Amino acid sequence: MKRLARLPAFGAVLFAAGLLLLWQGLADRQFISPVFFPSPSRTLAELTRQIASGQLWKPLEATAARMFFGWALASLAGVVLGAAIGFSRRARDFLEPSLEFMRPLPASAVIPVAILFLGLSNAMTVAVVAFGAVWPVLLAAVHGFASVEPQLMEVSAALRLSRKDLFLKIAAPSALPDILAGARVSLAIALILAVVTEMQASQIGLGQNILLAQRSFRSPELYAGVVTLGVMGFAINHAIVVLERRLLRWRGAHEQ
Amino acid sequence: MKRILRGALLPFLVFALWEAGSRAGVLPMDTFSRPSDIALAFAAGVADGSIPLATWLTVQAALVGFAIAAVAGILVGVILGLSPPLERTVGPSIEALRPVPAVALTPLTLLLFGFGLRMEAAVVAFACIWPVLLVTVAAVRGIEPRLLEVARTLQLGFPVRLRKIILPAALGRIVVGLRVAVSISLIVAVTVEIIMNPRGLGYGMIIAQQSLQPALMYAQLLWLGLLGWGLNALLTRAFGRWHGAFGPGVNP
């Protein structure tokens, strides 16, 4: 049984390895241009060189910090605004149309405006990341706070909970799953925007590294940067899934 | 009616205060500009054809990229959806590509294609293919097995099977992925223009900002907002109607 279960994974690894080998072979024999498609071994060598020399950490840290602060700001704003809109009919009437207009706006389109106000600074990049990453959290929070189970509301009315207790003990926990799901999407967007803004604003980071590598035709370095970003995207997504499971453990227990 | 008035209050206040603050000299012109100037800049941009042209270039790149993603995503998705063993083999390799931010590939596409439509469309296609592909795999896997058995009994060839059985049965759900992809396509196209590609609305905004024409920059930004909003409203309507006509009932 166990061997059968492992078989598909084996096939998948074999396929991926075959693909890389094919690439390696084609690049070594110069069937494909090593300038555009450097062989995987050269990319890997570049990556290990960056890790060994410690060159990788500074841009990685800068991009991660930019992403994190923008995301944290977006989450805070998203939850506060979302709670207001989800909780109060009136706030919804006043705010929703304006937000609906701003939401489909490409976040990168506010970069010129942000540069105008904040210059080519870290504050600018964080502001743009926050603007772009706020929407998924905001929508999720609105939905979460607006769809608290009626029975829970009845219970809290029967217990005569104050509005503050109602918010902290009933509404917030029941909106948490939605908010976390939204925050996960936001984090992915935050990474993308962190890369975009540092490309545009020439701030230190992985995005700028990729851009500089391209300008000087150091393609293994370019690929190493793309791989690093891919691994980073995968890792943060995985991390927040784990966090989600942790924070929502009570929910599974009570539903089963 | 009351709701519409309430919703219009905030934008109205913002623009009124903006205009008043600018006239009173509180808001500096070189960063804030002012709404009346923005309207004039927009009118001038439309009159000399530069804004319509930039809009067309952006939309063109978004559409080409989206079309590539839609065809490739549906094709690969159908193949993977029909064959679970193949999906298990190829799937993880595809999954490994998915977390790569599409815009990180912009420098690579510049190396490959140079400036212009092709590099922009390539990045858009990479970004748009994921929702289409994932939804198509799920949709094809959800097709009523009896339909596929009928196709096998009738000994239909693959193209006929695709056209007459698979696509009609799965399209209701594939459309969901396509709708997501359309929204992404415009966003990514503008982003590529802002970072490096010298064409379209994104580039127009950057140039307006760098040449100290904030009014033109805001005009293009607001126009872009309107464009995205319109596209979204259009899709919601079209998608809603589609859902009603074809119905989820065909493919539960």
Image (cartoon, rainbow, N blue to C red):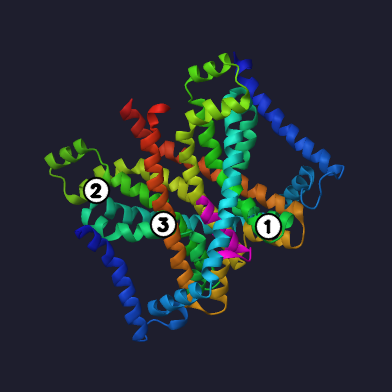
* Residue tagged 3: B230
Q: Residues within 10 Å of mark 2 (few under 14, many from 20)?
A: some
Query: With respect to residue A154, does B153 lie above or below?
Result: above
Q: Look at the image and say whether residue B30 sits in the magenta stretch.
A: no
Q: Residues within 10 Å of mark 1 (few under 14, many from 20)?
A: many
Query: Which mark is on residue A167?
Result: 2
Q: Position of residue B107 (x, y in %)?
A: 68, 57
Report the magenta stretch's main SS.
helix
- The mark lying in front, picked from 3 and 2, is 3
Q: Amino acid at mark 2?
A: Phe
Q: What stretch of residues is rendered in magenta?
A: B184-200
Q: Residues within 10 Å of mark 3 (few under 14, many from 20)?
A: some
Give the secondary structure at mark 2: helix
Q: Position of residue A100 (x, y in %)?
A: 36, 56
| Image quarter of residue B116 | bottom right
Q: Chain of mark 2?
A: A
User: Spatial distance from mark 1 to mark 3, Cα to Cα?
Assistant: 31 Å
Query: With respect to residue B226, does B238 lie above or below?
Result: above
A12 left or right of B219? right
**Mark positioned earlier in the residue sequence (1 or 3):** 1
* Residue tagged 1: B107
Q: Amino acid at mark 3?
A: Gly
